[in-house]
Image (tube, rainbow, N blue to C red):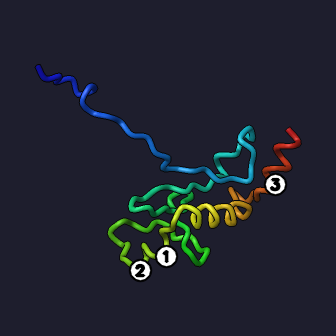
Amino acid sequence: MTDTNPAAVLRATTRPTRYAVSCLPDDNIDANLFEITVEYRGANRWAVTRLGSCLGADGTWARGVKEYDRGDDWLAAHRFDLETALRLAEAAAPHVTVNGFTVADALRLGADQ
């Protein structure tokens, strides 16, 4: 007799696909607003993203680039191995601003609360 229960046949796998990078502590109310993410894009390549923008190897953010606009050259400049992606995200994190507030402003305001 064959077991036809999909749960008995299929085996789930788990893998990390997203890292959050921020200079603010987790308990800061604004931490998620200042967050940069490193997200898996397949083939051992990672993207550094923030609010729909993608960080390039040159340190500039590509804003609103649609999938159909991305050629091989663009992908080569915006996809990294995990170590490089995390390094780029950590370097960019201190420079995040939200509505004119810097990371330093958010840290100071958080300390005052």
93 left or right of 56 in image = right
Circle 1 SS class: helix
Type of amino acid at the residue the image marks with label 1: Ala
Task: Residue under label 3, please give it.
Answer: 105
Q: Which residue corresponds to the image point at 72% horizontal and 64% vertical from the top-left? A: 95
* Contact? badges 2 and 1 (CB < 8 Å): yes
* Quarter of the image where the C terminus is located: top right
Q: Quadrant of residue 89?
A: bottom right
84 left or right of 113 in image = left
> Taking 93 as reference, is 113 above or below it?
above
Mark 3 crowd level (few <14, some 14–19, many ≥20, 10 Å Cα): few
Rendering coords of residue 83 (x, y %): 59, 63
Q: Mark 1 or mark 3, which is nearer the start of the sequence?
A: 1
Q: Which mark is residue 77?
A: 1
Circle 2 SS class: helix
Q: Residue furthest right?
A: 112
- Taking depth in this image into account, of 3 and 71 the one nearest to the observer is 3
Q: Residue furthest left?
A: 1
Q: Residue furthest front?
A: 1
